[in-house]
Amino acid sequence: MSRVALALGVCACLLATAWSDAGAQQGEPRRLAHVNVLLFGVGGATYDHPNFDDNLFPNVTYARRVWRREMRQVPIWVRLGANFLSEDARFFGYTVWQESDPGPFPEEVLEHTSDFTFRVEMLADVLHGPYYALYAGGGFGLHYLSFSSNGKDSQIPIFDENDNQLAPSAALGARFFTASQPLTGYVEMRWLSVYGKTSRVLSESRPYLTEQTFEFTREDAWSIEGGLGFHW
């Protein structure tokens, strides 16, 4: 994940340098509008899911200001965003069996869980100055979930499961910018949802999941993220 953050930082620096060079060649400063904002960031989420560990994630968002004439004093934004959570787990235990399998046994298991989320949100700048904005808002996220489990020794097929879930989200953050340069920085705290494999406690006589009992379970989460982007 550090490579992702490094790549985003390098891209931001290159684009900012190119913009500065273009302005210097023209010999006059540019005054930029602040209607569109594109941001790239990296965040960390914390939550209490028994089968999905805390981890970092990349994030990209695009926001456009709406109702500019009607809401001059309080800027309103519609924002589209996407982030990705993923985890690979290797342990000694049970993979996901068929209900009819007569003799499940513990073995080395490799599991993969991923959550790609596409968000639609509406935000308002609670405080808005010439170089900063404090904003808050919320919306909904569409979670595309994927899970797979593979036992090293058993001959049963790899178990795969996919699902879609709609969940609310809320955000509170700050942006930093100027009117003469396109760069924008931000920090944000968000309430969101995470999903992992079934968290119910199975009986001692059957300490394994089956394809019939498997499901995704949801937990509340908090994330803090930051990054760079551009406005125009």
Image (cartoon, helix red, strand yellow):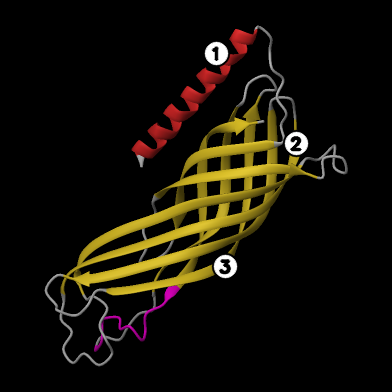
- Per the image, the residue denoted by label 1 is 21
- Considering depth in this image, is 22 or 122 the residue closer to the camera? 22
What residue is shown with label 3?
A: 166
Numbered disc 2: secondary structure: strand
Q: Which residue is rendered at x = 87% and y = 40% of the image? A: 69
Q: Mark 2 highlights which residue?
A: 127
| Lower position in the chain sequence, tag 1 or tag 3 | 1
Give the class, few, some or many, for how many residues have Cα within 10 Å of label 1's Cα (few <14, many ≥20).
few
Question: Viewed as shown, does residue 232 lie left or right of 15?
Answer: right
What residue is at 33 percent from the left and 57 percent from the top? 87
**Percent x, y for residue 207?**
26, 82
Q: Main SS type for the magenta part?
A: loop
Residue 169 visible in the current orientation: yes
Residue 38 falls within the magenta-colored stretch: no
* Residue in view at x 49 percent, y 40 percent: 41
Location of the N terminus by quadrant is top left
Residue at image coords 27%, 70%: 149
Mark nearer the N terminus (2 vs 3):
2
Give the residue type at disc 2. Answer: Leu
Task: Tell me the SS state at disc 3.
Answer: strand
Question: Splitting the image into 4 quarters, where does residue 88 fall?
Answer: bottom left
